[in-house]
Amino acid sequence: MDHAEYLQHLARQQWLIPLFPLVAAAIQSLLKRPARKLSAALTIITMGLSCILAVRALLATISGPEGIHHEVIRTVFNFTWFKFSDTSSLDLGFILDPLTAGMAMMVAFVGFWIFVNATGYMHDDENFTRFFCFLSLFAASMLGLVISNNLLLLFMCWELVGLCSYLLIGFWYFKPSAAAAMKKAFITTRIGDVGFFLGILMLYWKSGTLLLYTHDPLHPGALEQVGALAQLSGWWGLSVASTVAFLLFIGAMGKSAQFPLHVWLPDAMEGPTPVSALIHAATMVAAGVFMVGRMYPLFTAEPNAWVMDFVMWIGCFTAVFSATIAVAQFDIKRVLAYSTCSQLGYMVMALGAGSLAAGQFHLLTHAFFKALLFLGAGCVIIGTHHEQDMRRMGGLRKYMPITCICYVIGMLALSGFPLTAGFFSKDEILLATFHRNKLAWGLGTFAAFLTALYMTRQIFMVFFGRWRGGDEDPGHGHGDKAHEDHRHHEPHEVPWNMWLPIAVLSVFALFMGWLGTPWYGGNLFQQYLAPEEVASVHSDLVLWLSIGVGLLGIVLGWAIYGRKTMEHATDEDPLSTAMSGLFTFLNRKWYIDELYEVTVFRFTAACAMFCRLFDKLVVDGVLHAITWGAWAISQIFRWVGDEFFINGGFDSGCESVRLGGKVLAKLQSGRVQNYFRVLTLGAAILLLVYFFT
Amino acid sequence: MDQVYKVAPQLLKFLSHLLGWLPWIGKPLAAFLGNPPAWLVMAVAIAIPILFVVAVFPGIFAYTTLVERKALGRIQNRIGPNRVGRWGILQPIADGVKLLTKEDIVPRRADKFVHFLAPVIAVIPSVLLFSVVPVGAGLVPVNLNIGILFAFAVSTASVLALFMGGWASRNKFSLLGAMRAVAQVVSYEVPMVLAAVAVVMVVGSLSTLRIAKAQSGGFLNVTNWFVFRPWGFVGFVLFSIGAMAESARTPFDIPEAESEIIAGYHTEYSGFKFALFQMGEYLASIAMAGITVTMFLGGYNGPGSGPGILGGLISMCWFFVKLAFMIAVNIWIRGTWPRVRVDQLMGFAWKVLLPMSIVNIIAVGFWHYLTIRPIAWLVTTLWLVVWFVVLSKLAATEKFAPRTYRYAS
Amino acid sequence: MSIPLGHYLMLSAFLFAIGLCGALSRKNAIIVLIGIEIMFNAGILNLVAFWHYKYFTTLTAQMFAIFAISIAAAESAVGLALVIAIYRFYRSVDVDEITSLKG
Amino acid sequence: MDTIFWILSAITVIGAVLAISLRNLIHCVLSLILFFLGIAGHYFLLRADFLGAVQILIYIGAVAVLMLFAIMLTRHVTGDEGPREVLGGKWWAGMGTAIIIAGLLWAIVRKDALAQALPTGVAATSVAEIGKVLVTDWVVPFEAMAVLLTAALIGAVVIALEEIIRKR
């Protein structure tokens, strides 16, 4: 079998990757509650199998018998799902290319370790089996999304991912906040999905196919027609390609929590922590960025359209905006949540700046260290007996050394400390943005500074200083009331199945960035993923500045939070004492939720009010006028005489309507045989028609 | 049928030789029979099997009753009938005469037509069953290619007779008996058919003749009987139990349990109608024994059986010997086993026999696909034994222990 | 055999009509079911007749008949279970008395 | 052969008519059995042996017995308190529709040239062939049927058990 055939073979087998978790989910849905070990084993083993398959596919795309490939290896396997008629059919397909292979490997690998960690985190939960069932389904749908070569299949998996996130965010649905959060996540992403679906429809309308690639000149796939699509004019002064891209990007905004639609992501913290890790690192939010990457030819088809700028500015704004919010949060998971928002903003910004490789590279590295951070946060939460308020932590370094080390590694990677994974990927993004737009670059650099600052703040609040868990409640903490009695227990290190995943992930968080360094003959990752892209010109200014702001953020964080750590849980945040107005503003998340409340909600209410007024004033007025007119005329008629006709006519009219209703109601007799008789009569009439024609 | 077509002209010729000696009518009759027209040959060919079935099996039935009464008597330490003829040999005839001359009583409020119809219908399927039982090498009254299926289809019809009899009598014991009979027969039908499926799978045909033929060969025409295979043995046991329950014989005779519901569905029958019911029941039981023999005990195969006149005769002997053996076993079981309780009866059919028969079908699958015989033997035996143990453990609701005496010891 | 196909078709048409009449006019739910069974059988007879006269080289018609018989068996099982359930609830199997869905 | 056809047709029609018109429910079912037997005879006449056997096995062995059971479970055991009417109160509706349908079908059949067709050949289908086709060409409907039957079985049990479950 030569390499091309082998690749074809692999593409044909791509469906096996999501199949394993899907089967696991199917089996688990039938398991009984006590079958905890079996359930967990099923999830983890199937994920491991998927991971092995994904690695096999990845290796095949990296190199063949002739050595490393120098162009994009893209193999597709398409088949007909069903036929509408002889000429048109609905085709589905699977794809194997660097984007898919890398992403699938990341999802399977990170997912695997998250699942291992979840066995520890969910250890005491009574719905353990259900949880793992959902996890398997989640992983399966995300893997399905990654391998699909058809926009419709992608959309189906996309919605499945949404469904699973809904189920998992609301896993503790008996908590009202969780129930609200699940609805919020579902509805907010649904707003984006409207755009996505419109984009799909438009693409199908204009290109006649939903397959992305076919490698068949007679029936080219949608992405192989971008040249033609860029020539057609669409809406808002854009070409069709850009219009579709814009609509699809709205979907991605919902999924990847970009600025106006970001509100669901922090609330998604109500789910169990492994779910947060899964949503934030490997699956849900990655789906949006991945989708943009998958449809990237559409975005770049028309070089001068405003869509790319729009994408970049949305990303840029989200990056800065969420980073500022993250600085002022006290909930350990919420800080990470806003940090995810901000990092997703980075990725989107990179995509908007025209660098697919940088965006996807950051997606991959971020997945590793964000999963690490979330799982670490989960370990902290378990270790401190379900405490989530950072003010009530502190000093955990002594109690949980392994977690602490891993967490610090994750923090360094996220802050872009030199030579860690985040450093390289963030550097690529800033470099790409630098060449596109200086202002966006500046803001991005500022966000990098903030990132370092809030991560340092978090580290010092959580791991250093004095253990403040015994203190009284700081008032508006997010601690779980059910575990009130655990409050005064000492924190402890977590079991091995919880720290092993973060240890493994921290290795990757440290070293994964080396794939993307420009130092030995160019950026390996970019050459693998998008060799046709022109590598951004190296710039010392960008490099040193990003190192500089990262270090500055860390130092500043140390200066504010590390030099003199919090003594009591009730102490005020040093930043808050310095700039209390700003801090509150940030702590309240820029009042976005309140803003929505006063704008969107009010607007809806106002619309309803307006309608009511319109009804009352205009419609009723007209009706009243008519009535008055009629009354006047009837008075005249009455005086003219002929009371008999009007009264009699109305009475008989009403009577006939009533009678008609009565007769018609008889038809609904509730007697089966009557229906049957009518049916038979109908058949008889049909036969008559047949007989006489 | 083909063989009968060959035999019929020879029979006619033989007759013509016999009748040729008669005075003045002999010559033309002999000439006519020596060169018979086609319709006559056909009529004779059709008549032979019918006559055979109608003559032989009721005879067997008659003497089965005698043997049963004698054997039960011996088992119960009595002598049994011995007054009519030597060893009571004319007893069946005496019984027949007695029943024919007895008053035929129909309850006043009974449904007269159905009451009359029930015993008639009871006999018909039992007699029809014999039409597919091969009694010798190539000797089967009707060689249907759906023989076994036909047998099952016909035997289900016997339920109706029981039901009609029980219902038409307008007697609560009769009705209880009928309900029990219907439930029992319908339940035991299922494992029985599935046990037969195993054989059909191996042979690849539903024809009873083909099934019997498939068991010839081997050492002395004996070793290829299906009962000497693991699945065949299990199938034999299952099928025999099913057949016993289907013809409502002890230990499965709760539809007519004397101590509970008098005589079940035939409580209100007397005289010849009662005799018909008995006849139907016995004939069904004999026919089922015949089918059991055909399917599992090698049918007509035995040392010396084969094609040709002599082989055919020997094969017939073997068939009837085996039939007698099965009948004897039936009688023996009837004499020595207590009646199954009504609540255990259904559970046994659905929880033990049915799963076991399905397991047996899977065993046949193993047997078919494992071409190396010793391995096939090992695997099927192990499979069946394991399942037997599992099912019997699951089915055991009570633990049996030596009886403990509270006061006596 | 000198019987033309039409005879079978007419026979099955008549049987169908008889079953229809029973299903339409009798009050007892069990007899309604009986009528439906008669109609089923008439239909299957039609299939088999067509098979014998026209399409005997293929087995499709027989397959259809087999499946139709199986479905009829399932239908009657469920139908009779429903009758029993209805009887438990209404103490009657008279289809004219079961009018809870009356509008 | 023709005579057999006419005899069988008479049996079927008489069985069907009795099945829907008798007063006593049990008699109805017994006539229905007669009807089923006639149909089975027709199948044998049409050389569909397997179908004939299946007809007897399923309809007489299962469906009819089931109906008898249903009658036993829903009526007083003796079953004689059947409907007072011979044909229900609205017999004219059913009759009329049925006659119209029968007449129309009859007219259509008469008009059609196909109706004059005589058998062009004789096909004896072996059971083995049917079995083979059932697990090759028709395996999907076959399996679907298996699932359907299982579902119907479970459904029937559940419906009939409902009350007992509620009592617990």
Image (cartoon, rainbow, N blue to C red):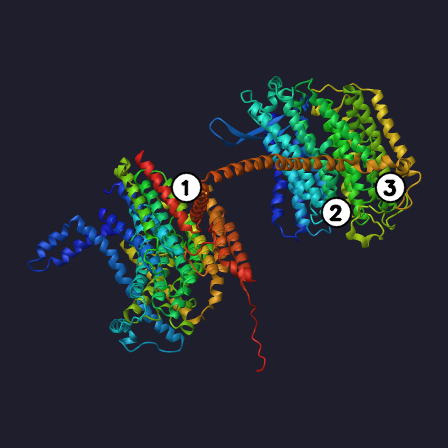
User: Dot 3, how many residues are within 10 Å of its Cα: few (below 14), some (14-19), or many (20+)?
Assistant: many
Q: Which residue lies furthest to the bottom in this view?
A: B408
- Chain on which label 3 sits: A
Left or right: residue B277 compared with residue A399? left
Q: Label 3's element?
A: helix
| Observer-nearest of A444 and D64 | A444
Mark 2–mark 3 Cα distance, whole angstroms, equals 22 Å
Residue C53 sits in quarter: top left
Label 1 sits on what residue type?
Answer: Val
- State which mark lies toward you, 3 or 1: 3
Mark 3–mark 1 Cα distance, whole angstroms, equals 74 Å
Whether labels 2 and 3 share one chain? yes
Left or right: residue B397 compared with residue C67? right
Where does label 2 land, which residue? A121
- Chain on which label 1 sits: D
- State which mark lies toward you, 2 or 3: 3
Where does label 1 land, which residue? D133
Residue at figure coordinates x 85%, y 36% from the top left: A583
Residue B385's label in the rendered image is: none
Residue A461's label in the rendered image is: 3
Residue D17 visible here: yes
